[in-house]
Image (cartoon, rainbow, N blue to C red):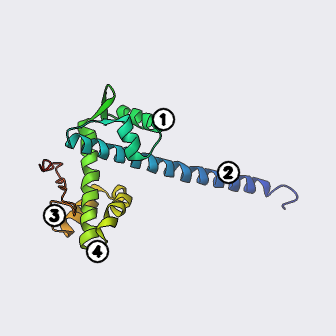
Amino acid sequence: SVRGGTMTPIWVAAGATLLFLLWWRRHRAGAEVSRQHTEDALKHMFEQEYRGRHASLASLSGALHLPDRAVVALVTRMQMRGLLEARGVEFDLTPDGERIALQIIRAHRLLERYFADEARLPLRKIHAAAERKEHSLSPADVDRLSASLGHPTVDPHGDPIPSPEGTVAPPAG
């Protein structure tokens, strides 16, 4: 009976399970945000290098809309994972960092192509739509998307789409 205390262990177990599930959900959400920040940072760094510049704490903070303290923590984690190297106040991608950056850029630009050509979104909305979706595609998903679009080489803005092997045409001009 409940009054005799025999149900108490069940309620304690149920409460503990609920707390664990809430913690796990929050933990997973935090890991997802951290992965997205990492991928966005790699994308920013590649785009800077592609244009002959280097990313800095200030440029990352501005691109990611994060406070400096959060960017320092992010850069430290990325450095420990071997995705970037610090050179004074500037950062360079490692080969692993560049590979991931190119995967995200490829996904983003193919999504922009899809949203412009197939979904018929207005040009002003395709970038934001691609930003929201780019992190959820696996490399196999990106390959299928590319094939379904006829393997386009440029996005709707005229930017080159990286190949599956990670090559990208040099900047125009």
Question: What amino acid does circle 3 point to?
Answer: His
Q: Are marks 2 and 3 in contact (CB under 8 Å)?
A: no
Q: Which residue is located at x 79 percent, y 54 percent?
A: 8
The single residue placed furthest to the top in the displayed view is 88
Nearer the N terminus, badge 1 or badge 3? Answer: 1
Q: Element type at marker 4?
A: loop
Residue located beneath label 4 in the image: 120
| Residue 144 locus on image (x, y percent) | 23, 64
Question: What amino acid does circle 1 point to?
Answer: Arg
Spatial distance from mark 1 to mark 3, Cα to Cα? Answer: 40 Å
Tell which tag, 1 or 3, sits nearer the viewer. 1
Q: Which mark is residue 16?
A: 2
Nearer the N terminus, badge 1 or badge 4? Answer: 1
Tell which tag, 4 or 3, sits nearer the viewer. 4
Q: Which mark is residue 69?
A: 1
Spatial distance from mark 4 to mark 2, Cα to Cα? Answer: 48 Å
Nearer the N terminus, badge 4 or badge 3? Answer: 4
Question: Quadrant of residue 114 in the image?
Answer: bottom left
Nearer the N terminus, badge 2 or badge 3? Answer: 2
Nearer the N terminus, badge 2 or badge 1? Answer: 2
Residue located beneath label 3 in the image: 151
Question: What amino acid does circle 2 point to?
Answer: Ala
Position above or below: 85 against 19 = above
Q: Element type at marker 3?
A: loop
| Residue 87 locus on image (x, y percent) | 29, 26
